[in-house]
Amino acid sequence: MIVPMKKASIFVLDAAREESLEKLREVGVLHLERKTVSSDALSKLIDRKNKAENALGILSNYKAGKKAVHSPEEAPEERVSAQVLDIADKRKSLQEQLIFNGKEISRIEKWGNFNPAALKELSAAGVEIIPYELSGKAYAALADENRFIVLGKDKNTVYGVAVGAEIEGEQPFILPERSLSELNNKTLDIKTRLQDIEVQLGKLAYKKKNIKAELAILKEQIEFETARASLEDAGTGEVSVSWISGYAPEETAGVLKRAAAENGWALVIDDPKKEDNPPTLVRNNAFVRLIQPLFSFLGTVPGYREYDISFSYLMFFCLFFAMIFGDAMYGIILLAITLIVGSGYKKKSGKFPDAVKLFALLSCCTIVWGALNGAWFGVEYRYLPGFLKMLVIPQFNSDVALRPFPGVLKTLLQIPADQPANTAYWNVQFLCFTTALIQLVWARLKNIKNLLPSLVAVAQLGWLVMMIGLYFLVLSMLLQVALPGFAVYLIGGGLFAYFIFANQTGGNFGVNIGKSFANFLPTFLNAVSSFADIISYIRLFAVGLAGSSIAQSFNSMALGDGLSGSVLIVVLKLFAACLILTFGHTLNIVMNALSVIVHGVRLNLLEYAGNHLGMEWSGYSYMPFALQQKEKGESK
């Protein structure tokens, strides 16, 4: 759930500005209102922070030695950061010189080792010797009066010098500043100096922890200085007063009131106005919170006035993940990797992170889905052991004997007698479209609940009814189910209800209807989009089928014509089969993981949350003005 916020404004005497901010930071519940501020002190702190981050980024490529030698008088971290950046600048300069020298060597090496200074001295003495690189055609076209000495040739170019005068229409070869041998020596020197720089940076790597600690302090100082610069003057007459505003969770209002009373602040607390944009604090139970790492990875935060869809997102994402991966053995492999990684984290922090728990849940869902489908590394159903066959739902595996389709659904959907509606492919596609209807109807129900008692809620109900009709239309078009007569009425009636009530936010009822019909084309296109949204859930079936086919293909490649032949041939075939299976199934797992991001995440974010809930993910996280040490202590 999204925690309700209160807007709080605190007034303090100018003489107690610094002390009041320190006390407010100790309270640690107020998220300061965003403002653009500047000050000399803030600029200096930000500059120090940027330098420390750059230095840490450079040192992150180096591993600190187990027995790092520390000097008796350690330099402060600020000076270490400056030292690292200075060394890095020297490295960059040397690398640029190295690249330039490499280009020069490549440009002149075909001329051999000559002294450019000697040619310049001859030119100064009146002897014009001008080097050229001529194409074969240009060389053949030289006039008789051109005095040209050939020094070398290759397949396409003639190298030589013109004596006395330039060759008309040809660009002279630009002489280098140094000879080839000097450039080679200079390059060796630069490489030696670069190696020394790498050693210097490696010796400073043990300072990474110190710089990280300095960064934490700098962030606190920046936050404090930002808060100080955000204080606005509200003084009148002889009394000089400053004030600052922000947002705090509703349940912390008492904490702010006590702090105001103890410190002599004037405090104003009120509900956020419509034009205010409070931060978002999402608070859920331990199970629902498992989806939070995915939201953090995607960088999505719901707006304060939007929905918290954590629970529904988690439920549907688990299903999408399982259907895309589709194979129980893949789920077991993912679970094993997750537990191994999670054990490493637990040794360090003493608990499993939510991200590890999420992957464990997704892996288990994949195992269950794969077991119900009889999918184990793409092995055919007939080769599975008996206890695994017992787990299979016959309607989800095409190798199992056909079972009668449930009579109630067959009557409701008006499935023809000759329609093979109990094949596995048909059933999974039917499940995809039904999942689409459930999720999108769920979205519309949330909108209805949010809009009640407004008449606009009836428009959302109309859209919901229309989508049910569209669902039957999709089944008719893609699964050859007879279109029931009531579906047309659901589509037409639902769309008509939407037009009648979509703009009933007050005022003249008839005028509001006119406003709705004025937007006929966009509304009609949105209805078509809803039809496409239901169809788009077929991607779950398509991607799962593709993964299954790839797994079976690699199995066929690996096994080939069996393991017949001599012992050596059998060993070689086994080795090749292991390589093919390892590569093939690893590739398939990676492709499935990408498909989850592309398709599984998309269905939740775009079709569900975006198109039908109307979410823009316009929020920003609640981050109170607080001491870092206090936050760390509370999180333990």
Image (cartoon, grey):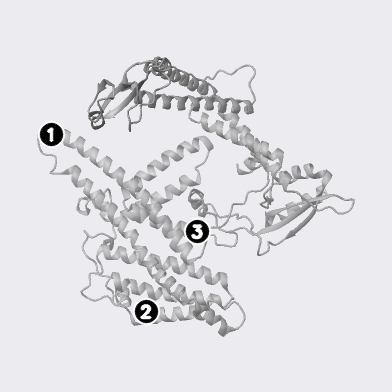
Q: Amino acid at mark 2?
A: Ala
* Mark in the foreground, 2 or 1: 2
Measured Cα–Cα span from mark 3 to mark 2: 31 Å
The answer to whether mark 3 and mark 2 are in CB contact below 8 A is no
Residue 326 shows which numbered tag? none
* Drawn side of residue 575 relative to residue 635, left or right: left
Q: Does residue 492 lie above or below 64 as drawn?
A: below
Compared with 442, 267 (above or below) is: above
Q: Nearer the viewer, residue 329 or 462?
A: 462
The residue where tag 2 is placed is 487
Residue 544 visible? The answer is yes
Q: Residue at x 50, y 23 (%)?
A: 202
Residue 510 coordinates in the image, percent (x, y): 56, 85
In this rendering, does residue 378 appear at all? Answer: no
Tell me the residue at 39%/57% (across/down): 319
- Using the numbered discs, state the Cα–Cα distance from disc 2 to disc 1 in whole angstroms: 63 Å
Q: Classify residue 229 as left or right of residue 605.
A: right
Residue at mark 3: 311
The residue drawn where x is 41% and y is 38% is 340
Q: Earlier along the polypeptide chain: callout 3 or callout 2?
A: 3
The quadrant the N terminus occupies is bottom right
How many numbered markers are drawn? 3
Dot 1 surroundings within 10 Å: few (below 14), some, or many (20 or more)?
few
Residue 370 placed where, x, y %?
A: 32, 53
Give the camera-side residue of 335 and 4.
Answer: 4
Q: Earlier in the sequence, mark 2 or mark 1?
A: 2
Q: Mark 1 highlights which residue?
A: 569
Nearest-to-viewer mark from 3 and 2: 2
